[in-house]
Image (tube, helix red, strand yellow):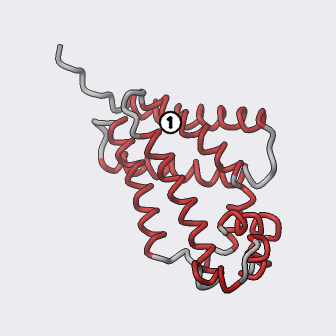
C-alpha cells in the first residue's frame, strides 16, 4: 500500500492524492486500506515518517563514523544527501505540499531535534576547542545550507554527472568553511 501511495503521490501530486486512488493503485478496496490507515493524512504522515527515518539514519551512519576524519565525513554526507534528495525529489516535493497536515506533529519536532543533535555532536568533535556559540552556528549553517541547497537543486531533474559536479562543489564549500574553523580553533595536541 505504501508503494502504491508513493506512486500516486509521484504521478498525481498531493492535491490529487486520495485514499481511493491509493487503494485502486494497490489493488485493494478502500475498506481494506482503512484497516491500516484511517485517512489520507495518516498515509502521508507514514510516508514522511519513513523519509525522516531514512534521512536520520543516513546522517547518523556518516557523521558518527569516527574512523573517518571530519572533513571526509562531511564530504561523504554532502554526496549522499544530494544524491538522496535528487532520487526522492518527486515524492518529497509532493510531501512538502502536504506538510501542513503533519508539520507540527510531535514526531516532526523529535526528528528535527534528532538531526540537529547529530550535527551538533559532529561539529563538537570536529572543533573540540571552539566555543559553544561556534558549535551551534557551524552546525546550523551546515545543516541549513545542505537542506536548502539540496532541496532547491533537486527540484529540477538532474543527470548523474550534474549531481556529482554539484555535490563536489557544495562539499568543497562546506569543507573550506569547516577547515577554516579548525584552523582558528585547533584541536589540542595529543600526548605522546
Q: Could you tell me which quadrant the N terminus lies in?
A: bottom right
Residue assigned mark 1: 74
Relative to 60, say whether 40 is above or below.
below
Work out which residue is located at the far left of the displayed protein and give it.
Answer: 191
Left/right placement of residue 68 relative to residue 132 reads right
Say few, some or many: other residues with alpha carbon within 10 Å of mark 1 (under 14 / 14 to 19 / 20 or more): many
For the point 77% across and 36% down, the residue is 160
Q: Position of residue 105 (x, y in %)?
A: 48, 77
Left/right placement of residue 125 relative to residue 174 reads left
Q: Quadrant of residue 187?
A: top left
Relative to 39, say whether 103 is above or below.
above
Q: Position of residue 4 (x, y in %)?
A: 72, 67
Name the element at disc 1. Answer: helix
Left/right placement of residue 67 relative to residue 97 reads left
Left/right placement of residue 191 relative to residue 29 reads left
Relative to 142, say whether 116 is above or below.
below
Q: Position of residue 61 (x, y in %)?
A: 45, 41
For the point 65% across and 66% down, the residue is 2
- Residue 29 or residue 139, whichever sits in front: 29
Q: Quadrant of residue 174?
A: top right
- Residue 66 or residue 23, whichever sits in front: 23
Relative to 20, say whether 125 is above or below.
above
The number of callouts visible is: 1
- Residue 39 or residue 173, whichever sits in front: 39
- Residue 101 or residue 124, whichever sits in front: 101
Q: Could you tell me which quadrant the C terminus lies in?
A: top left
For the point 42% across and 32% down, the residue is 70
For the point 54% across and 34% down, the residue is 76
Q: Position of residue 186 (x, y in %)?
A: 32, 28
Amino acid at each position: 500500500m505504501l508503494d502504491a501511495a508513493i506512486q500516486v503521490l509521484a504521478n498525481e501530486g498531493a492535491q490529487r492524492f486520495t485514499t481511493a486512488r491509493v487503494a485502486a493503485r494497490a489493488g485493494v478496496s478502500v475498506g481494506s486500506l482503512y484497516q491500516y490507515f484511517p485517512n489520507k493524512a495518516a498515509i502521508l504522515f507514514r510516508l514522511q515518517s519513513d523519509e525522516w527515518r531514512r534521512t536520520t539514519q543516513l546522517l547518523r551512519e556518516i557523521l558518527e563514523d569516527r574512523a573517518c576524519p571530519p572533513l571526509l565525513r562531511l564530504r561523504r554526507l554532502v554526496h549522499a544527501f544530494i544524491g538522496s534528495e535528487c532520487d526522492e525529489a518527486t515524492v518529497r516535493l509532493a510531501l512538502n505540499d502536504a506538510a501542513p497536515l503533519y508539520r507540527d506533529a510531535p514526531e516532526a519536532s523529535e526528528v528535527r531535534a534528532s538531526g540537529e543533535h547529530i550535527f551538533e555532536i559532529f561539529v563538537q568533535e570536529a572543533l573540540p576547542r571552539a566555543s559553544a556559540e561556534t558549535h551551534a552556528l557551524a552546525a546550523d549553517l551546515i545543516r541549513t545550507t545542505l537542506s536548502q541547497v539540496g532541496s532547491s537543486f533537486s527540484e529540477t531533474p538532474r543527470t548523474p554527472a550534474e549531481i556529482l559536479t554539484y555535490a563536489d562543489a557544495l562539499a568543497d564549500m562546506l569543507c573550506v568553511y569547516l577547515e577554516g574553523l579548525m584552523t582558528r580553533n585547533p584541536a589540542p595536541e595529543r600526548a605522546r
